[in-house]
Amino acid sequence: MGMNARLVPILLLVCMVLAACAGPQPGGAVPSPASSAGTSAAPAGAPAVPTGNSPKRLTAAILADPPLVINAFTKPLPGTEAVEVLVNSGLTIVDDHGLLIPQLAEAVPSIENGLWKIFPDGHMETIWKVRAGAQWHDGTPVTAADVAFTYQVGSDLPQFRNPGYKWVERLDTPDSRTIVVSWSQPFINADALFGPRPETGTFVTPLPEHLLSRTYAQDKAKVADLPYWGGDFVGSGPFRVREFIPGNHIVLDANDQYVLGRPRLDQVEVKFIADVNAMLSNVLSGTVDATMGRGLSPDDAIRTRDRWTAGKMEGQMLFIVVVFPQFINTNPPIITNVQFRRALLTAIDRQQMVDTLQRGLSPVADSFLSPANPTYDATISAAVRYPYDPQRASQMLADLGYRKDADGGLRDTARQPLAVEIRVGANSNLQVQSTQAVAEYWRAVGVGVSTVSIPPQQAADNDYIYTFPAFHLQQHPSRVDVLANFGSANTYYP
């Protein structure tokens, strides 16, 4: 598990480079090839954690001001997922290399260990056994009944629902520690059931039946309003909530009874600092030892590197930046044409974008996997490459019937101008700059482009987010486990 790695006193910063014409995130349709790799860089050698008999304490920060400890009913804010894995545990968890490892469970189901069975008729069975000694922070044992309750909540409440649940025929608990899940058909992420949700969202981690079931039975809608999700949170992770002050910080104490062993740190304070400049000032002054979750832009990273004498920057590729196309109620309809999307991808000089926007910190991606991913070497030879060639891009558009008018803009056979929209989140300078660069490359071959910054008040509005007319540029994890999000079952219909 990657939990301890995130607690070392380093500044974590995530850098992205562009990926164009890839498929949508959960709620979209089948992807086209991704086109760039993303990196993160981390300065090492920050102030050391105290040793000896003194308490080992770490002050971290996230670029967000979460209203709750666990934002289970809303889209996670930057950094909140890092807090979640500190205070709660899944049956399994994804480690720093993108590999699934056991956490509350004794083992990850697999064909090899006999815990994942695929039958001739396509049905499946997966089995987990909760580790002996697993406890909630209040001392109550974590049991199979908690997992069964979690599945019930995940099946009933839309905020928890995951498309994978539709293939679960039933969940049995033959004893207090064993969970047997029967599936109606194969599902690639079945072994991640009841693991922490990454940025893209997965199954919800186990919930304490003894604390939530009464409210759930009386009125399901009131579960979201319980103080449990805030300062009263009781989880099963390596740290427990000591103090939660919205708008300021959360203090976490080491969980002496954590099933994988007591953390080496005695206490972690996570400050809520939504402004990046304030975040950097705290890092440079030494009042913050580490950042978690969303990282910094390359400019901020380099600026910090040059001023921060307590450490050095180290690159780690974790994400890509992707331009997702729309395939439902698309405007203009030509976007559904794969030749058109290939032409647009060929029109982008992604190497120049890496060199300028990323300061050369990352290679261009020819796959949605980064070179740091364990499966990269085995898959990169099959990746389709799209080198920058504006003349070829123009010819591909001409082959589709587009002709330039006197002003250099493209028009179709009905003399209608070709114009597309690109939406982008307004909270990321890198993504905004990447969107502007893509727009200019496309304009250079005659495509009319308008860019739209997503208003912060609509960032969690699924009806708005997933019904973009043409393209949406955003960051995306470069991990194998997110492949399941590209299935048609994840298509979002408002």
Image (cartoon, rainbow, N blue to C red):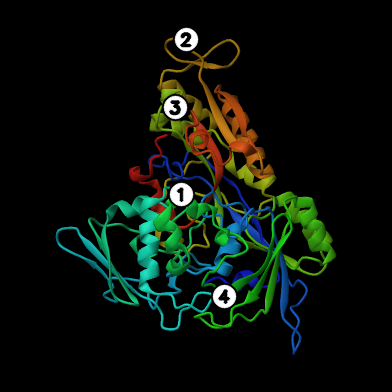
Examine the rendered structure and indicate whether residue 221 appears above or below residue 452: below
Task: Tell which of 478 and 385 is nearer to you.
Answer: 478
Please report whichever mark, 3 or 1, sits nearer to the chain's N-terminal start.
1
Q: Residue at x 46, y 41 (%)?
A: 22
Q: Nearer the viewer, mark 3 or mark 1?
A: 1
Look at mark 1 in the image and give the residue it sits on.
221
Name the amino acid type tagged 4: Pro
Q: Nearer the viewer, mark 4 or mark 2?
A: 4
Q: Are marks 1 and 2 in contact (CB under 8 Å)?
A: no
- Graded by Cα atoms within 10 Å as few (under 14), some (14 to 19) or many (20 or more), the crowding at tag 1 reads few
Distance between the alpha carbons at the discs numbered 3 and 1: 53 Å
Look at mark 2 in the image and give the residue it sits on.
415
Badge 4 marks a residue whose secondary structure is: loop
Please report whichever mark, 3 or 4, sits nearer to the chain's N-terminal start.
4
- Graded by Cα atoms within 10 Å as few (under 14), some (14 to 19) or many (20 or more), the crowding at tag 3 reads some
Q: Nearer the viewer, mark 2 or mark 3?
A: 2
Name the amino acid type tagged 3: Met
- Graded by Cα atoms within 10 Å as few (under 14), some (14 to 19) or many (20 or more), the crowding at tag 4 reads many
